[in-house]
Amino acid sequence: MTRRGLLIILSSPSGAGKSTLARRLMTWDPSLRFSVSATTRAPRPGEVDGREYYFRSRETFLQMVEDGEMLEHAEVFGNFYGSPKGPVEQAMQDGRDTLFDIDWQGGQQVRNSSLGKDVVSIFVLPPSIAELDRRLRERAQDSDEVIATRMAKSRDEISHWAEYDYVLVNRDLDRAEADLRTIIMAERMRRDRQPGLTDFVRGLNREFEDRP
């Protein structure tokens, strides 16, 4: 009764905890495959092709888009980013779930793709805007100008919450992780995601017929 793998989309405004939750899920279930994006930007020191990103030329990337080899893609600050379809399809056939850490636009593209019926989409909200601002400042990774840009973008991102299958409010990281696990386990057990279930039930019925 091997099932097809799921495409688990995790989205949130910056600072709501999406990336931390994604890392925790990967630790909880090492069989989860994290979707490695392709990009046209140059590798940074220490980055390895196929680990952080698939580094591709602009021409190669656009040809992949033209050939339908990208589940989703977008141009960000002059560079293209996208999710190659091939590795995801292989994982699905192997019964492995793929985790996507992408924004609402990427999630929309994946849901509208040929693999959309296997998507489980989850949006993570902060408990308040004040808390979102505090978390961004507490990371001490960005300037005030960058934080202001992220906060302005957050309003647009949050406006797309109703497009998702599930919505979590990340008041407490441990509770949010537990809720995510519950969602994934329940989705894995859905009747239509157990391809051998019909034959199994037929076998049970045959046992009834064979009883004296």
Image: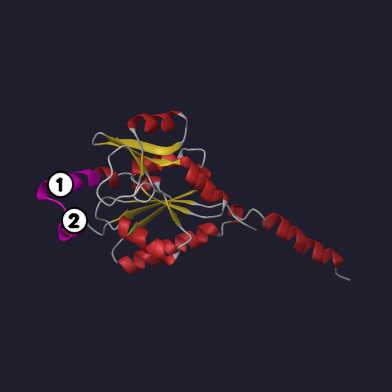
Image quadrant where residue 17 sits: bottom left
Q: In this image, 208 relative to 177: left or right?
A: right
The residue lying at 78 percent from left, 62 percent from top is 205
**Three-letter code for the amino acid on which mark 1 is drawn:** Val
Tell me the quarter of the image containing the C terminus: bottom right
* Residue holding disc 2: 136
Task: Give the total number of marks visible in the rendering.
Answer: 2
Q: Is residue 14 left or right of residue 105?
A: left
Question: In whole angstroms, how far apart are the C-alphas of marks 1 and 2?
Answer: 10 Å
Region rendered in magenta: 135-155
- Magenta residues, dominant SS class: helix
Please name the residue that numbered disc 1 is placed on: 146
Q: On the rendered image, what quadrant is the N terminus found in?
A: bottom right
Tell me what residue is drawn at x 18 percent, y 56 percent: 136
**42, above or below 122, in the image:** above
Closest to the observer, 47 or 191: 47
The three-letter amino acid code for the residue at tag 2 is: Leu
Look at the numbered disc 1 and give the secondary structure of its residue.
helix
Q: Position of residue 93 (x, y in %)?
A: 57, 49
At which x and y percent is residue 184?
Answer: 47, 59
